[in-house]
Amino acid sequence: MPNIKIFSGSSHPDLSQKIADRLGLELGKVVTKKFSNQETCVEIGESVRGEDVYIVQSGCGEINDNLMELLIMINACKIASASRVTAVIPCFPYARQDKKDKKSRAPISAKLVANMLSVSGADHIITMDLHACQIQGFFDIPVDNLCAEPAVLKWIKENIGEWKNCTIVSPDAGGAKRVTSIADWLNVDFALIHKERKKANEVDRMVLVGDVKDRVAILVYAILTHGIFSGPAISRINNACFEAVVVTNTIPQEEKMKHCSKIQVIDISMILAEAIRRTHNGESVSYLFSHVPL
């Protein structure tokens, strides 16, 4: 593919390399460092004039530093006369802060991040499984919100022998739409867990809505897109009755897998690579909402 450059931020170089390999391209030369006062410095090591530039940076690790690095990389490419700059953000930072809660002075930080990306010079955003699809409306530039669902369906069929006799369970009401979609594709039943909270991040009680008796509950196989595993999550998983906790590699998982044998990873680099290829060639990306590229 002519006139295309792919650069990697420092958040997830392994995923960036897999995307580049899939496209048959070399990652662009970039040097990122910090000055002694902790300011981020980025140097693009090759010409991007007239090029279609894609910068891969996930919202993980040192999130604030990585977000700032992404903004500077976008701006550096834009003022170096890149034709178009696309931010490929597999896990969108601050996505859970997408609305006001009951406190009137709470921020909508996901909107702030959207503004920052636009002001930095991004022409297009490619991301995956936003916390809420409405976040796309925070942007005045095109946003492709890809789905891990086709890769999840493929994993279920290949790795769970009793999948035809399973029940797909949503851990909360917010995931009900995604769970019903997966259940429809597999032609199986679904259930959900209703959580009652007295305050944020603290569940008072849970009620199961649906029938899971004598069935494989795909929550005993926990499947999720962005495996952040904050706080004591790893120790809790090790002590829980999960058969497996299946995540995508939108976030690096190597270190966590060393401490938890239950974690399994679905590679989604081929979905992101195909989205980049189709975007560069002016093709539709809707095929990726229901298919995994071969």
Image (cartoon, rainbow, N blue to C red):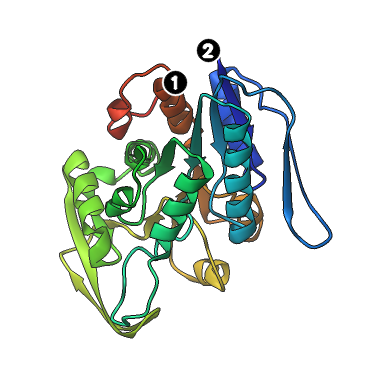
User: Which residue is pictured at 61% across the width and 21% down the height?
Assistant: 49
In the image, taking residue 17 as reference, residue 294 lies left or right, namely: left
Where is 280 relative to 252, above or below?
A: above
Q: Quadrant of residue 153?
A: top left
Q: Earlier in the sequence, mark 2 or mark 1?
A: 2
Residue shown at the point (64%, 42%) measured from the top left: 9
| Label 2 neighbour load within 10 Å: few <14, some 14-19, many 20+ | few
- Residue 182: x, y in percent? 24, 45
**On screen, 100 above or below 20?**
below
Which is more toward the observer, 108 or 22? 108
- Residue occupying the far right of the picture: 36
**In the picture provided, is 3 more to the left or to the right than 290?**
right
Q: Secondary structure at mark 2?
A: loop
Direction top: furthest residue: 2
User: Can you see residue 213?
Assistant: no
Q: Which residue is mark 1?
A: 280
Q: Is residue 236 above or below residue 276?
A: below
Most foreground residue, 50 or 159: 50
Q: Position of residue 265 (x, y in %)?
A: 51, 45
Q: Inspect the image, locate mark 1, and give the three-letter code of the amino acid beneath it.
A: His
Residue that appears at 24% across and 69% down: 193
- Determine contact: label 2, label 1, CB under 8 Å: yes
Query: Could you say which quadrant of the image residue 82 lies in?
Result: top right
Residue 175 or 138: which is nearer the viewer?
138
Q: Residue at x 22, y 64 (%)?
A: 192
Q: Callout 1: helix, strand or loop?
A: helix
User: Which percent across, then down, holds residue 275?
Assistant: 41, 28
Residue carrying label 2 = 1
| Quadrant placement of the C terminus | top left
Q: Is residue 17 left or right of residue 165?
A: right
Amino acid type at circle 2 is: Met
